[in-house]
Image (tube, rainbow, N blue to C red):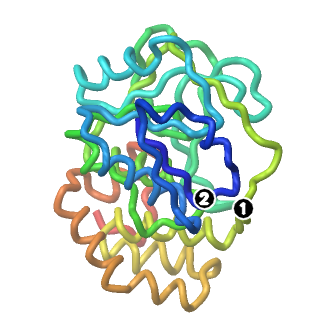
Amino acid sequence: MIIVNDGSADDSFDSIDRSNCRVIRHSERLGVAVSRDEAANASQANTLCFLDGHQRISIDCIDQCKRLAISRNAIVCPDISDFGDAQDPLYGAYFRLRTDSPPFSAEWYRQPPINTVTAVNSLRAPAYVIPRTVYPKVRWSRLLRGWGGSEACVSIKAFFTRTPILHLCGPIAYHKFKKTFHYEVTLDEIWRNHALIARICFSEATWYDYWLPDVFREHLSEETQLEMDSDAVKAEHLEFQQIKVRPDHEFWTRLAFQKVPPAVKR
């Protein structure tokens, strides 16, 4: 087990049995995505399971998800319980394209599925398991900062690379949230993260003709807009475009189930 303490003031890791785990501590908070990617790179396992510190899992949950992930070469998530105000189990998530907030979102399925294994199209929160062979296609951008957009990044990359996301009904991950964040979360930072996802995952034309002018410009500072054209962002954009297999317009027709914006080239 690899645990990354991302510059947290929480000292709960001090009570962990270190005999079967490695704890990586950051002196300053780098963000969810950087921490998870660092843990993935440090691991030697053939599957990667991502959990938050406030989660507790049912017996054999990880092993069941792992077996399915390997057999189907897919991202696998179990049932989720005690998420926010939801007392009943939640059964995977579906993508929602929003217009009243940062655009890339997901909603929980709240009805029990008919089948034990169900294809879903988005992640909203840990827990989930990703085979190591799959991870390079959907890995978090290390340019993401703070909180907000991490699951969206993996979900949209999974869509564009045709990586399945499966829900496994039965094993369960319980959330034990704190009442408040122990660090500052700003809407500006979340908008910045969502813009970064769009800049990396979509073509140059879709970014400049649609996402930037129609969605993000009014929510981004001049500094952040310039950052979207930095060498680091451009390099990650080009790297992802080389493994992307779906065209941009299918994001609307096959994931968001909306009409393709006129500015988006087919």
User: On the rendered image, what quadrant is the N terminus found in?
Assistant: top left
Q: Does 196 sit above or below residue 105?
A: below
Tell me the CA gap for discs 1 and 2. Answer: 10 Å
Look at mark 1 in the image and give the residue it sits on.
183
Q: Is residue 18 above or below residue 136?
A: above
**In the image, what residue occupies the spot 57% across and 68% down?**
28
Sequence-first disc among 1 and 2:
2
Q: Secondary structure at mark 2?
A: loop
Q: Quadrant of residue 29?
A: bottom right
Asked if labels 2 and 1 touch by Cβ distance under 8 angstroms, the answer is yes
Q: Which numbered disc, 1 or 2, marks the residue closer to the eye?
A: 1
Above or below: residue 129 compared with residue 199? above
Side of 86 where 263 appears, left or right: left
Percent of width and height locating residue 256: 48, 47
Q: What residue occupies the far right of the structure in this picture?
A: 179
- Badge 2: few (under 14), some or many (20 or more) residues near its Cα, within 10 Å? some
Asked whether, in this view, residue 223 is left or right of residue 71, the answer is right
Residue at the (29%, 32%) spot, across then down? 47
Quadrant where the C terminus sits is bottom left
What residue does disc 2 label?
147
Residue at 33%, 79% in the rendered image: 232
> Of the residues shown, which amino acid type is indicated by label 1?
Tyr
Front residue of this view, candidates 180 and 196 = 180
Q: Residue at x 59, y 57 (%)?
A: 148
Q: Is residue 42 left or right of residue 242?
A: right
